[in-house]
């Protein structure tokens, strides 16, 4: 694969390099022995990210905030890099860096407010209920995808991951007592939210996620296959809201999907700084 043409992945590589410090002041919010450290470096993460966006976009108020206040359509990989940088910094950065990143996100959220044109309802990115929806969609997607296609993640460790990630929601403004702390409770919460629909903005956004611009032919084919797998991991109700057909069963099998993820990961790891950042994570986990 010609990595020279993988320019859309380069912002992700730079984000990875910046977010994992060489000389952290401390072990950060979670620490090297946490399940968060192990799960958040799984190579199935891009697939979990795609699925997470599909779930998150089904809340019309959360989607309206993105559609009206973000440049995601002009620069989808840049926005993905910014989100990835935040996740990596809060996971692997020292405490000061993680909390500073969260403070910056909260500051940005003060300006994200408006009216959703589909429901006519007001929204604010500071609303803990919207923050909780975004958090739950991300955490539940990570658990689902990693258990299916990543390293071994048994039921106990999956619950531990959800419980540890309560801190992740708390630092952006969700009271800890409102955050689900087990796999069962986070899935129950998602199912309980009544305001769910695939608005035109959601369909437009997910169309870009499934078929992003500026990919070379080989990477586009790989991305399209992974996007279909992401669709196949959605709950039936979510897939039906988008009007997606269920992918062929053979596309969803573990080993072929792991091969797709391996090809994407190899391309990503060949970019400057990625392997070094991963080595820093592994060394701290082993020590």
Image (cartoon, rainbow, N blue to C red):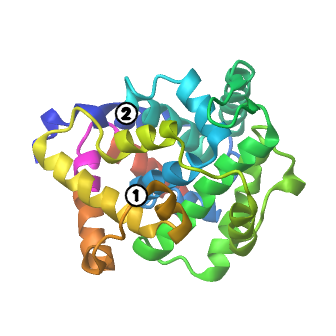
Q: Secondary structure at mark 2?
A: helix
Residue at 55 percent across and 45 percent down: it is: 57
Give the side of residue 62 with respect to residue 38, left or right. right
Give the side of residue 254 with respect to residue 6, left or right. right
Query: Which residue does the numbered mark 2 point to in the structure image?
Result: 77
Q: Residue 255 at x, y = what percent? A: 28, 78
Residue at 48 percent across and 68 percent down: it is: 146
Query: Which residue does the numbered mark 1 point to in the structure image?
Result: 47
Residue 155 in view in this figure: yes
The quadrant in which residue 89 appears is: top right
In magenta stretch: residue 96: no
Mark 1 surroundings within 10 Å by alpha-carbon count, few (fewer than 14), some (14 through 19), many (20 or more): many
Do labels 1 and 2 touch, CB within 8 Å?
A: no
Mark 2 surroundings within 10 Å by alpha-carbon count, few (fewer than 14), some (14 through 19), many (20 or more): many
- Total number of numbered labels? 2
Residue at 39 percent across and 32 percent down: it is: 76
Residue 90 is tagged as none
Q: Nearest the camera: 122 or 283?
A: 122
In magenta stretch: residue 268: yes
Q: Nearest the camera: 33 or 217?
A: 217
Q: Residue 266 at x, y = what percent? A: 24, 54
Residue 33 in view in this figure: no
The C terminus: image quadrant: bottom right
Q: Is residue 94 above or below residue 148?
A: above
The quadrant in which residue 211 appears is: top left
Residues shaded magenta = 264-273
**Mark closest to the chain's N terminus, 1 or 2:** 1
Task: Give the distance between the C-alpha atoms of the residues marked 1 and 2, in whole angstroms.
Answer: 15 Å
Q: Residue 66 at x, y = what percent? A: 57, 31
């Amino acid at each position: 694969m010609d990595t020279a043409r993988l320019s859309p992945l380069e912002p992700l590589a730079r984000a990875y390099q910046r977010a994992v410090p060489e000389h952290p002041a401390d072990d950060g919010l979670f620490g090297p022995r946490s399940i968060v450290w192990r799960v958040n470096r799984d190579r199935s993460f891009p697939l979990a990210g795609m699925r997470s966006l599909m779930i998150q976009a089904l809340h019309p108020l959360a989607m309206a905030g993105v559609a009206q206040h973000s440049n995601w359509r002009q620069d989808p990989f840049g926005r993905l890099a910014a989100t990835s940088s935040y996740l990596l910094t809060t996971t692997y950065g020292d405490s000061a860096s993680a909390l500073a990143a969260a403070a910056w996100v909260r500051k940005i959220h003060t300006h994200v407010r408006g009216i959703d044109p589909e429901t006519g309802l007001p929204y604010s990115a500071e609303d803990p209920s919207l923050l909780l929806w975004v958090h739950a969609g991300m955490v539940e997607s990570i658990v689902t995808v990693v258990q299916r296609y990543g390293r071994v993640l048994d039921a106990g460790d999956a619950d531990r991951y959800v419980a540890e990630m309560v801190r992740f929601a708390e630092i952006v403004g969700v009271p800890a007592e409102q955050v689900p702390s087990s796999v069962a409770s986070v899935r129950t919460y998602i199912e309980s939210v009544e305001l769910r629909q695939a608005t035109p903005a959601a369909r437009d956004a997910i169309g870009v996620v499934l078929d992003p611009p500026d990919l070379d032919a080989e990477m586009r084919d790989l991305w399209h296959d992974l996007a279909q797998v992401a669709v196949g991991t959605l709950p039936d109700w979510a897939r039906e809201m988008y009007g997606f057909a269920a992918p062929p069963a053979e596309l969803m099998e573990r080993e072929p999907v792991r091969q797709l993820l391996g090809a994407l990961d190899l391309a990503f790891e060949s970019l400057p700084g990625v392997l070094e950042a991963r080595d820093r994570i592994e060394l701290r986990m082993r020590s």
